[in-house]
Amino acid sequence: MNEAAPSPTVAGRARVAARAIWLVLIAVFVIRYLGDNWDETSDYLDELALWMAVGTIVAVNVGKFLVAEQVRWSLLETGRRFSVARAFWIYTVSDAAKYVPGGVWGVMARIQLYRDEAIPVRDSARVFGLEKFWLVWSGLLSGIAFALPSLLSRADARWDAVPAGATTSTLGIVALAAIWVAGMWIGHRVALGRNPSPRTLAVTAAHQLGIAFLLGLSLWFPLSTILDAGDIPLAIGAFGVARSIGYVAFFAPAGIGVREAMVVWMLRGTVDTDDAILGAAANRALTTVAEAIGLALVLVAMRRHRAAGHEQVSPTSVGEEPSR
């Protein structure tokens, strides 16, 4: 007798329902916003220069490349060496699945790709969890650190009890950096069961700072007619905090809506609300275009690789870290 397929759990159904409701609410908000602010939206699109769009797309794709490098390094921590191209393929393909309704397909795609590379499910889950922790923790802490000077300089009741100035900002950034490194060490220890080497911490920190800078720059480009170059740290900080909150918002596919709301909140007091909404929306649209371009390039490259008669090469086991 064939066994019946397992039915979805109550939690799974609730997650799917929450995502569906959230997407409907986002669609309603977008339609109403465009209807009420069409003139402002048209003016913004007229001012959005080609170089801003291209800059955003390039910054996103280079940032995604660094995320793929982080994937490669995390796999190396389990003793498996991947080529740069293979790591970028695995990350790009699995990342595209985050837009599929259901909320788990990005994780499932990554684990399946790891299984194709003969990596056990347990190791896959531990590595994937470590990667996500790195992104969430680093985005949040580095985001606050980058945005801190701007936040402290605002005439805002939230910060009245905190003395503003370079000394306060410097002390705050140093404290956040220490907390960040400590959290990275603990996360590595919990996920992989051993202490990270100083080199691993340094490489991971470099990756995360590069990711924060590039993805933050992708937010600054659509707002560059409003924010000057001196506001780039604020854009980096706003996007870093927003993407971290978006990662853990289970009801929002790819953090849609949540990330934009956090960007608007982080920029308030510096950027007009409508301008922040339009800039965040443009960032989302251009990020989606950038991801589609990256995925298309990866698929074409892999097809040509296979057409040339090359076999897929499984990762090689290594007993030591690579030279960088």
Image (tube, rainbow, N blue to C red):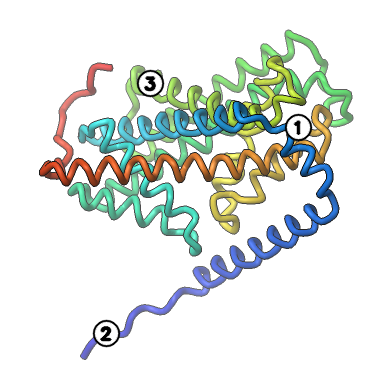
Q: Are marks 2 and 3 in contact (CB under 8 Å)?
A: no
> Tag 2: residue type?
Glu
Numbered disc 2: secondary structure: loop
Q: Count of labels shown?
A: 3
Numbered disc 1: secondary structure: helix
Rendered position, 296 above or below 207: below
**Residue at the image position 23 percent from the left and 34 percent from the top:** 82
| Neighbour tally class for label 2: few under 14, some 14-19, many 20 plus, Cα within 10 Å | few
Which quarter of the figure is the N terminus placed in?
bottom left
| Neighbour tally class for label 3: few under 14, some 14-19, many 20 plus, Cα within 10 Å | some
**Residue at the image position 82 percent from the left and 39 percent from the top:** 273
**Residue at the image position 84 percent from the left and 45 percent from the top:** 39
> Tag 1: residue type?
Leu
Rendered position, 265 above or below 174: below
Q: Are marks 1 and 3 in contact (CB under 8 Å)?
A: no
The picture quadrant where one finds residue 245 is top right
Of all residues, the one furthest to the top in this rendering is 167
Task: Residue 313: give x, y in percent of width and height.
Answer: 14, 41
Left or right, 51 with respect to 27, comes to left
Q: Which disc is residue 203 wearing?
A: 3
> Tag 3: residue type?
Val
**Visible residue check, residue 247:** yes
| Labels 2 and 3: the sequence-earlier one | 2
Q: Which disc is residue 267 wearing?
A: 1
Left or right, 113 with respect to 287, comes to left
Q: Which residue is mark 2?
A: 3
